[in-house]
Image: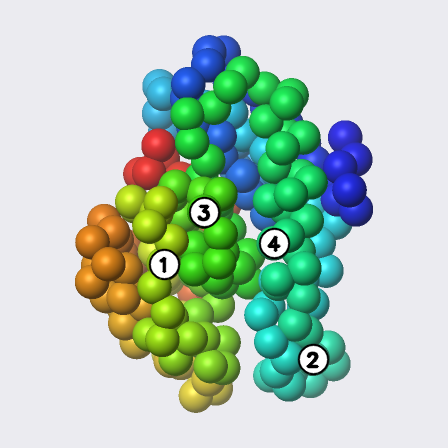
Amino acid sequence: MQIASKEVQIFPAKFESVPLVIVNCFEDEGETIYRKVQALTNKDFSFAAIRGIDCYTELTPWKSPALRKKEPDFGDGANAYLAELTEKILPEISAQIPAPSFSILAGYSLCGLFAVYAAFNTNAFKRIVCGSGSLWYPGFLEFCKAHEPSKKIDRISFSLGDKEALSKNPVFAAVKKNTLEIQNVFQESEVAATFTEFPGNHFFEAEERLAKGITSVL
């Protein structure tokens, strides 16, 4: 279904008072992630996959130059998209499902970066899943250290592939260091923050990794 400017696929729970998982997607991987979570847990949950996102503009909080040739520069649309998500999309999703107990925001790569950014800028979510998040993003570590996450956040899951920090690009290579330091920011705010390292590079078994992260916070 169309909500605001995005295409949203909704999988309702069987019962009320169970979590709602929201995943920002790059393409049409939402149902695959949903099925993988279902295979990993017997817990009931609602699930919504959002697509139609301009990943290079709507997921990043401030402008930054592209790091690869033939890719666009990064934009500063995260605040606008977060407002659309929390004020328009989330209420409409909630109206289509049994009343949820709380909401989880999950994402992979730049979507993971956005999920962590949301943890500092809204009280709409209780738990966050950041799968191989682009936490190398210039200035993002400094932002996290200078701010406190929402008091509503009680759990966050971080993960990376064990080859991601081996990049020859020094910006990308900082991802593990930054992830662990941002994990510590949450721990200092008394949030249960976990870090899992999976085998492989950034693209290896991405949907499976994100599903495992979601399962860990249900």
* Residue 47 relative to residue 152: left or right: right
Q: Amino acid at mark 2?
A: Asp
In three-dimensional space, the C-alpha distance between marks 1 and 4, rounded to whole angstroms, equals 15 Å
Q: Earlier in the sequence, mark 1 or mark 2?
A: 2
In three-dimensional space, the C-alpha distance between marks 4 and 2, rounded to whole angstroms, equals 20 Å
* Residue 150 relative to residue 49: left or right: left
Callout 3 crowding tier (Cα within 10 Å): few <14, some 14–19, many ≥20:
some
Q: Are marks 3 and 4 in contact (CB under 8 Å)?
A: no
For label 1, the residue is: 149
Residue located 60% across and 76% down the image: 62
**Element carrying mark 2:** loop
Callout 2 crowding tier (Cα within 10 Å): few <14, some 14–19, many ≥20:
some
Q: Earlier in the sequence, mark 3 or mark 2?
A: 2
Task: Say which quarter of the image contains residue 132.
Answer: bottom left
In-front residue for pair 190/160: 190
For label 3, the residue is: 123
Q: Earlier in the sequence, mark 3 or mark 4?
A: 4
Query: Residue 206 in the image: x percent, y percent?
Result: 48, 51
Residue located 73% across and 77% down the image: 72
For label 4, the residue is: 82
Task: Say which quarter of the image contains residue 2.
Answer: top right
Question: For the C terminus, which image quadrant?
Answer: top left
Q: Are marks 3 and 2 in contact (CB under 8 Å)?
A: no
Residue located 34% across and 64% down the image: 148
Q: Amino acid at mark 1?
A: Pro
Callout 1 crowding tier (Cα within 10 Å): few <14, some 14–19, many ≥20:
many
